[in-house]
Image (spheres, rainbow, N blue to C red):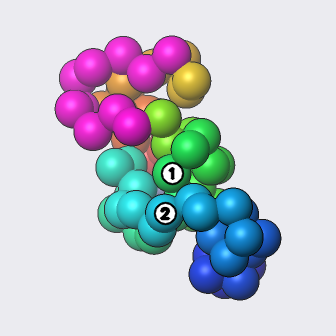
Amino acid sequence: MEIRETKEYQELGYAVVTCPVCGRETLDSYWICEHCGWEYDGTTEETLFSAANGTTIREYRLRRQ
Ligand SMILES: [Zn+2]
């Protein structure tokens, strides 16, 4: 899926942001990253607990390996 072709981006005003886990492009406002599955909730600090994902960015990265 091309992120800029989504309805959320074109019509609903979602912004393209960099996924803090995998570094690929994703959308804000709790969009699920299509590359790694991280739900974007604004967390960018690696060791801060993300309620939406139930873990921290650091832990999530480790689990994917
Ligand atoms: Zn990602």
- The foreground one among 54 and 52 is 52
**Numbered mark located on residue 15 in the image:** 2
**Numbered mark located on residue 28 in the image:** 1
Does ligand 1 reach within 8 Å of label 1's beta carbon?
no
Q: CA distance from mark 1 to mark 2?
A: 6 Å
> Residue placed at 71% from the left, 83% from the top?
5
Does ligand 1 reach within 8 Å of label 2's beta carbon?
no
Which residues fall within the magenta stretch?
Answer: 42-51
Image quarter hosting the N terminus: bottom right
> Residue placed at 57% from the left, 24% from the top?
52
What is the number of callouts on the image? Answer: 2
Percent from the top left, x then y, of residue 43? 34, 33
The quadrant in which residue 55 appears is top left
> Residue placed at 34% from the left, 49% from the top?
20
- Secondary element at tag 2: loop
> Residue placed at 55% from the left, 26% from the top?
53
The kind of residue on which mark 1 rests is: Asp
Q: Is residue 49 above or below residue 42?
A: above
Q: Is residue 51 left or right of residue 49?
A: right
Q: Are marks 1 and 2 in contact (CB under 8 Å)?
A: yes
Q: Assess whether residue 34 is covered by the magenta stretch.
A: no
Q: Is residue 8 left or right of residue 23?
A: right
The kind of residue on which mark 2 rests is: Ala
> Sequence-wise, which precedes: disc 1 or disc 2?
2
Percent from the top left, x then y, of residue 48? 27, 20
Percent from the top left, x then y, of residue 54? 54, 17
Percent from the top left, x then y, of residue 10? 68, 76
Label 1: few (<14), some (14–19) or many (≥20) C-alpha neighbours in 10 Å: many
Q: Is residue 65 left or right of residue 23?
A: right
